[in-house]
């Protein structure tokens, strides 16, 4: 592996860690909202705000998952090309 490849690999790993933190935080917050709703710990006045926030968190998670899938596919493609 060349120095350039190592640097690129480190960048990818750092990016993945940042995404995982963001993804993890979004999932944690989403789970908390779900628990609050299930336990009826929120008022009707808060319900709309919580549901909107949950929808936003779901969009964030879907975006992270989609981007991660693209990155993994790109890495796999590069690996296949290197082996050819």
Image (cartoon, rainbow, N blue to C red):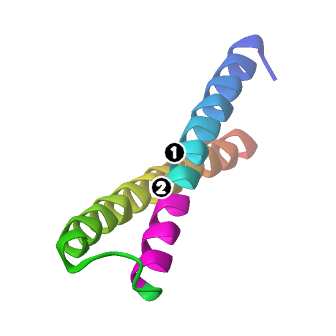
Crowdedness of circle 1 by 10 Å Cα count: few (<14), some, many (20+)?
some
Residue that appears at 43% across and 70% down: 33
- Is any atom of residue 73 visible in this view? no
Please tell me which residue lies in front, 25 or 34. Answer: 34
**Can you tell which mark lies on residue 10?**
none
* Inter-mark Cα distance, 2 to 1: 6 Å
- Which residue position is annotated with label 2? 26
Judged from this view, the residue extending furthest toward the top is 3
Image-quadrant location for residue 52: bottom left
Residue 16 in the figure: left or right of residue 68: right
Q: Classify mark 2: helix, strand or loop.
A: helix
Specify the quadrant that holds the N terminus. Answer: top right
In the image shown, does 80 or 76 lie closer to the viewer? 76
- In the rendered view, would you say 62 is above or below 25? below
Main SS type for the magenta part?
Answer: helix
Q: x%, y% of residue 18?
A: 57, 36
- Is the residue 15 above or below the residue 50 in the image? above
Is 23 placed left or right of 13 in the picture?
Answer: left
> Mark 2 touching mark 1, by CB under 8 A?
yes
Q: From which residue to which does the magenta span run?
A: 26-37
Report the residue at 45% width, 87% height from top: 38
Q: Position of residue 83 (x, y in %)?
A: 75, 45
Task: Let me know if residue 21 appears in the view.
Answer: yes
Q: Assign a secondary structure to mark 1.
A: helix
The residue to which callout 1 is attached is 22
Residue 14 is a magenta residue: no
Residue 34 lies within the magenta run = yes
**Extreme residue in the right direction:** 1
């Amino acid at each position: 592996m060349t120095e350039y490849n190592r640097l690129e690999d480190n960048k990818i790993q750092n990016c993945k860690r940042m995404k995982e933190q963001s993804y993890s935080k979004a999932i944690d917050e989403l789970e908390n909202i779900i628990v609050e709703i299930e336990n009826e710990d929120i008022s009707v006045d808060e319900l709309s705000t919580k549901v909107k926030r949950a929808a936003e968190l779901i969009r964030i998670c879907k975006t992270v998952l989609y981007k991660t899938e693209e990155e993994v596919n790109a890495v796999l493609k590069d690996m296949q090309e290197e082996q050819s």
